[in-house]
Amino acid sequence: MLKYEEIIEYIKNNIKSEKLNTPKKLPSIRSIKELFQCSTGTVLKAYEKLEQDHIIYSVPKSGYYIVDDFHNPNSSKQPMVDFSAVNLNSETFPYKNFQHCLNKSIDLYKEKLFTYSDPRGLKSLIKVLTKHIQNYQIFTKPDNILITSSSQQALNILSIMPFPNCKSNILVEQPTYYGMIKFLELNNIPTLGINRDFNGINLDELEKLFKYGNIKFFYSIPRFHNPTGTSYSKFEKQEIIKLAEKYDVYIVEDDISADLDINKKNDPLYSYDTSSRVIYLKSYSKIIMPGLRVAALILPDLLINNFLEYKKWTDMNSPILSQGALEIYLKNGMFDSHMKQLVSLYSSRINCLKNILLECEYPNIQYNIPESGYFSCIHVNGSVNYDKIITSLYHKNIRIFDTRECFLKEYKCDNYFRITISEVNEKQIKKNIPIILHSIQKNLN
């Protein structure tokens, strides 16, 4: 038996013998590490497996606790309703079609699968992407498109590589995508923040930061922002571009939800750029399947060689098999068919969410529900017991994302609750959103 399996059995046996019982907290990771003479990673692996099996649950900054009825073998625990997930529900994965594309990719690129290839990406995929992204009002040359192993890899490289403006600070919206926050904090990269709420962004504050903040680039999610779900207006986009050109600042535009936008006139920042200031980033993993790990990055000429040097010594090249499969998936029309179904599904869920929220009136709670996309957001006027809300909802088999993770340490805020609709159906939305709102209201100070 492996060490982490021994830990799992130890915890289970102690729960059953009532040495550990609800609501008692599980032993700390440190104490289990010392007891079993193993690494922290081994203990975490055991606890993660117990959590996946719905035997324990974690509370941020508190620890791990036993699920109420695990010790009762006759309990009939309902499955978790997950309002935190961004990835597609497994039922919407295009398995069969994509399997066909993978098989075809192996036939076409079998020789390249066993050798290093161009760090820029598969040339045939880039050619297809050059035409495909015109659907988003993005017109560029193939030489400016690079393929990365996920959008996270692109963000990581951009964050550490030097830029032609010789500046060092990165500016991020507050709140923003937590993966970006985590990388910047872990690598001690100097970072500034600017508030973005349901009303957008303060352009005067942005100008001051661009002028005096030594900003290398501004990381932004203009369309269906994570976590607030808001989108910049055409005016805001044009003003941001003007300021970037005026103060020699680059913009990294993370367009995660481009394919889900039902408003075809909602053009990206990139389409307004006339001075090669915008770096455009688009992931295909979130809309096809998470394991795909393919993203497209459009870079200005001045940044290409430097980026490639960093990428080459990060992973040499992104996996050819995934790139080849995506190329075929785009070329044969399967992608367009998949997106029509997904847009229809997500729009129905968003509309359902909007209707439910409009029916629930709480004076201290505001909502932002976009027309489409993954994200909607609840904002609370006043302070709340955030940990208690997450824990109480978990006991009711409802999982929500800890939106505090989307803030830099100095901007930490407990007023936002991101709600995603990727993993939930309309029936679950109707039943559980009122429960979430009631729990927030109940724990409002």
Image (cartoon, grey):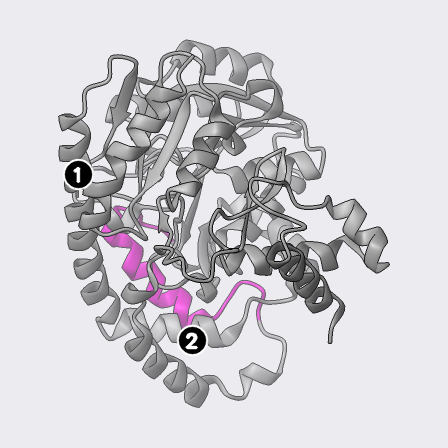
The image quarter in which residue 367 lies: top left
Q: Amino acid at mark 1?
A: Lys
Q: Residues within 10 Å of mark 2 (few under 14, many from 20)?
A: many
Secondary structure beneath dot 2 equals helix
Looking at the image, residue 338 lies above or below residue 205: below
State the residue in front, 199 or 301.
199
Amino acid under disc 2: Gly
Residue 105 appears in the rendering: yes
Magenta segment's dominant SS is helix
Q: What residue is drawn where x is 32% and y is 46%?
A: 257
Q: In the rendered image, which residue does mark 1 sit on? A: 265
Give the magenta-colored segment's residue range: 118-140
Q: Is residue 121 magenta?
A: yes
Q: In this rendering, does residue 277 appear at all?
A: no
**Residue 194, position in %: x, y?**
49, 19
Picture coordinates of residue 51, whole percent (x, y): 54, 54
Seen from the viewer's position, the closer of residues 57 and 296 is: 57
* Nearer-the-camera pick, 331 or 102: 102
Residue 54: where, in percent of width, then height?
49, 56
Whether residue 222 sits left or right of residue 262 in the image: it is: right
The vertical placement of 283 against 388, above or below, is below
Q: Quadrant of the N terminus?
A: bottom right
Q: CA distance from mark 1 to mark 2?
A: 31 Å
Residue at 18%, 66% in the rendered image: 337
How many numbered marks does the figure carry? 2
In terms of sequence position, does the residue under pointer 1 or pointer 2 come before the other? 1
| Residue 210 point in image, percent of width and height | 52, 18
User: Is 186 colored magenta in this rendering?
Assistant: no
Q: Which residue is mark 2?
A: 324
Residue 330 in the figure: left or right of residue 31: left
Disc ID at residue 7: none
State which quadrant residue 112 falls in: bottom right
